[in-house]
Image (cartoon, grey):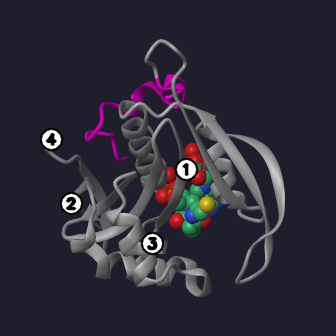
Amino acid sequence: MPRPPDLLVHESNEYTTRALSIETVDSAEIDQILQIEREVFEADAWSKKMVLEELASPWSDYCGIFDGSTLVAYGGVKGDIEGDLMTIAVIASHRQRGLGRSLLRTLLERASSRGMKQIFLEVRASNAVARQLYEEEGFRTLARVPNYYRNPTEDALTMRLELDTGNGVCQSLRTSPSAGEIGSVDIP
Ligand SMILES: CC(C)(COP(=O)(O)OP(=O)(O)OC[C@H]1O[C@@H](n2cnc3c(N)ncnc32)[C@H](O)[C@@H]1OP(=O)(O)O)[C@@H](O)C(=O)NCCC(=O)NCCS
């Protein structure tokens, strides 16, 4: 595992250096994952059974960002040649620092390196923040699915990204040369 990047965090008028790391997560992190699920998705949170099934699937690849020993973000991709971005979430206190983008790029690069060619996702139509992130990373909207979501009921947008341009370069990283290698993505 490469040395995790450091983050300068402004706290109580002092700058401190705190290590953030992006790592694979599994059932050992179930309690922290469920805490993120409840905090971020509230009534729409995945159950413990759903999360454990996701983590155990041989088609799944789940990563998290740790601030020290605390899991502050997690997300996952599932599939083989084609796949889905299953979820991505950053706890509120750690948003707008580039963690969501770093985690997404890590998941996409890992998927590409496993041979995934295209990846799909669904996003709530009202989720302007996530939609902007996905569009900036190269996802394009394919369709609108009426009443796809519950708690509350809402349309989904289906989006797609082609991961492999045919020359081994991940399309989403082509526009982002600073994204770095797998496992050493820069966290601003
Ligand atoms: C979507 C989410 C993962 C983004 O995480 P984040 O760490 O805050 O995102 P980043 O700091 O990496 O920002 C990446 C981009 O997202 C967009 N973004 C982030 N916060 C935003 C805000 N408050 N308003 C508008 N755009 C925003 C911007 O495009 C931003 O890029 P920029 O900083 O260059 O402008 C996070 O907001 C989250 O967990 N939301 C709740 C869960 C969720 O909606 N998940 C997606 C389900 S499909």
Ligand 1 within 8 Å, label 3 CB: yes
- Distance from label 4 to label 3 (Cα)? 24 Å
Do the residues bearing badges 3 and 1 touch, measured as CB atoms within 8 Å? no
Q: Main secondary structure of the magenta part?
A: loop
The residue singled out by tag 2 in the image is 18
User: Residue beneath label 3, please?
Assistant: 91
Label for residue 84?
1
State the separation of the CA atoms marked 3 and 2.
Answer: 17 Å
**Identity of the residue drawn at 34% across and 54% down:** 58
Q: Report the magenta residues as a range.
A: 170-188
Mark 1 crowdedness (10 Å alpha carbons): few <14, some 14-19, many ≥20: many
Q: Of the residues shown, which amino acid type is indicated by label 3?
A: Ile
| Earlier sequence position, callout 4 versus callout 3 | 4
> x, y percentage for residue 138?
63, 35
Give x and y (percent) for residue 162.
59, 30
Q: Nearer the viewer, residue 140 or 52?
A: 52
Amino acid type, label 1:
Asp
Q: Nearer the viewer, residue 120 or 9?
A: 120
- Compute the Cα span from label 4 to label 2: 16 Å
Asked whether disc 4 touches disc 3, contact meaning CB atoms under 8 Å apart, the reply is no
The kind of residue on which mark 2 rests is Arg
Q: Residue at x 52, y 61 (%)?
A: 87
Look at mark 4 in the image and give the residue it sits on: 2
Rendering coords of residue 114 (x, y %): 36, 35
Q: Spatial distance from mark 4 to mark 1, Cα to Cα?
A: 27 Å
Packing grade of label 3 (10 A; few <14, some 14-19, many >=20) is some
- SS type, badge 2: strand
Residue at point 26%, 72% (across, down): 27
Residue 172 belongs to magenta span: yes
